[in-house]
Image (cartoon, rainbow, N blue to C red):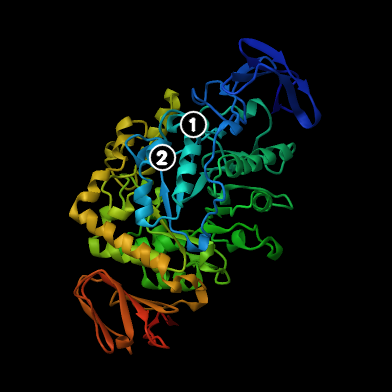
Amino acid sequence: MTTVRVWAPEAIQVELECDGSYLPMDRGADGWWSLDTERLVHGSDYAFRVDGNGPFPDPRSAWQPQGVHGPSRWLDHSRFAWNDAGWQAPPLAAAVIQEIHVGTFTPEGRFDGVIDRLDHLVELGITHLELMPVAEFPGARGWGYDGVDLYAPHHAYGGPDGLKRLVDACHRRGIAVLLDVVYNHLGPDGNYLAQFGPYFTDHYQTPWGDAVNLDGPDSNSVRRFFIDNALMWLRDYHIDGLRIDAVHAIVDTSAIHFLEQLATEVQRLEGELGRHLVVIAENDRNDPRVAWPVEAGGYGLDAQWNEDFHHALHALLTGESDGYYADFGRLADLARVLTRGLAYDGRYSRYRRRIHGRPASDLPGRRFIGCLQNHDQIGNRPNGERISHLLSPGLLKIGAALVMTSPFVPMLFQGEEWAAQTPFLYFTDHTDADLGRAVTEGRQREFAAFSRDTDGIPDPQSRETFERSRLNWGERERERHAGILRWYRSLIALRRSHPAFGDDRLDAVEASFDEAGRWLMMRRPGLLVACNLQPAPQRLECPAAADLHTLLQSDAGIVVGPDRLDLPGESVVILEQERSAMPALPTFHVEGVTQ
């Protein structure tokens, strides 16, 4: 017998549709309906009728082989044979993460296609593979942030077994797997949750859809829906950690916030499974309390994406000042992030026109994920330009070096390691013509202020937009790309092997710079990183430079003298301490503040 359950607290009648029959279900406590039946076995299709309406997919469907509008298919997780007994993920403090989109990472666009490229990630030195959302979303292609069947791996990627094969293969090669999940909203297309119960609330709003009911009437079961989803990925799919999308859009006024409950239950599961598990947040508020321990009044998550680090680095290297980049662009901003964790930690933001953030210097670097680019920062540009489209090779190497030598956990986006020239565009595949048209027109309105030629903005609904975003793996063989790949491999190898990177105390990082001269020196215990961001060569004072040993340099013309560093234009050098003391860094006064 199989027991099937569904939560529908306001329903008068719920029926299970299976094998051409409608079977009445019994109402139990707290609005849960259940039925014991022999008809539901692994591979059986089924759906629910609620008060005569439907059929609707199971809100907790683990398998949607016909997409968001089709029936659910019963899944027996015990049938899969795992080969990762004894696996332990590397600690986040020692991680090098690569974020990928399964559909564009390989020509196949499936979980099995990713398996075929794992050797590349191993050779690169990646320790953690982060998947953009894979929960069932409408159509065959999309970013995944409009998912609606949160328990079901996307059918076009290979479904439940495909994801399990990928995780199993990653673990056999020593790579941990992180999964991006969305708990602040669900997409509109194929979203049938409201047919079952009060999953959403109109008390709050999100930019992307109805807010989730986490603190209103009947919210206990809604919270359980999302918490159980998180635990399912970690338990049944052997995922090693979750990245929670836009936690600033999760509104919960309960005494125990949803994120705190999530972190607590993940820690409990960690003890049960005997595996290291992590939870990472995307947090637009610059609020370090997300990563504070629960005992200190925080939510207890392991880390958060450091948007200030990305923005400071991007604006400095590209000179862009549109939107939120208006708050950045100076070396002082980058130096502040490197030494204090955030640039806006209680400072006034011109872009937001208010005080933004909270001090975070009490956190170690391992609590922040730092990157030169990610899916948002590329795909939310009108034409999906990567950082390699915007920078010279010299500046690109400087950016990569600062990410890899920062006190933060480094993250790459797919293809970054070889300066991929394929864009990463925003794409969708809505079958609802009106919704598809609305997405296309919304994209044009969004970028109308940046370009008069809105007709030139790629249509998210076009298959060509998706195809253009696929990685071209053949680029790696061309010298310009091969040179960048060698640089990334060297940086990652240094990051993973040098003992200095084990010390991620922010108060142990020093930074000196000259805004006019466009140079920056960053010192960490045992290491010195010197960057010349201007096109012309320049000499930097560096007392006792002769006592330093060069670990990596981006330009053969770099000269380390007795008391100086001669840096060609747009170059960077990483030096190691050989004796007991590192040279003192020059001190400059910028806007009346000693940096």
The x, y position of residue 388, in whole percent, is: 28, 55
Q: Can you give x and y, in whole percent of width and height, for residue 133 in the image?
A: 49, 41
| 366 lies left or right of 459 | right
How crowded is the residue under tag 1: few (<14 C-alpha within 10 Å), some, or many (20+)?
A: many
- Measure the alpha-carbon separation of dots 2 and 1: 12 Å
In this rendering, would 417 be left or right of 198?
left
Above or below, 318 relative to 139? below
As helix, strand or loop, the secondary structure at mark 1 comes to: helix
Looking at the rendered structure, the kind of residue marked 2 is Val
The count of marks equals 2
Look at label 1 and name its amino acid. Answer: Gly
Q: Quadrant of the N terminus?
A: top right
Please identify, in this view, whether the residue under mark 2 or under mark 1 is nearer the observer: 1
**2 or 1: tag closer to the N-terminus:** 2
Give the residue pinned by disc 1. 159
Quarter of the image with the C terminus in it: bottom left
x%, y% of residue 136?
51, 32
Residue beneath the point at 35% across and 54% down: 123
Q: Can you say whether 563 is above or below 156 in the image?
A: below
Pick out the residue farthest to the right.
Answer: 29
Residue 430, position in %: x, y?
A: 43, 28
Snapshot quadrant of residue 323: bottom left
At 55% from the left edge and 71% from the top edge, which residue is drawn?
361
Q: Is residue 319 visible?
A: no
Label drawn at residue 585? none
Picture disc at residue 102: 2
SS category of the residue bearing label 2: helix
276 and 241: which one is in front?
276
Badge 2, how many Cα within 10 Å: few under 14, some, many 20+?
many
Q: Quadrant of residue 204?
A: top right
Asked if marks 2 and 1 touch (Cβ < 8 Å), the reply is: no
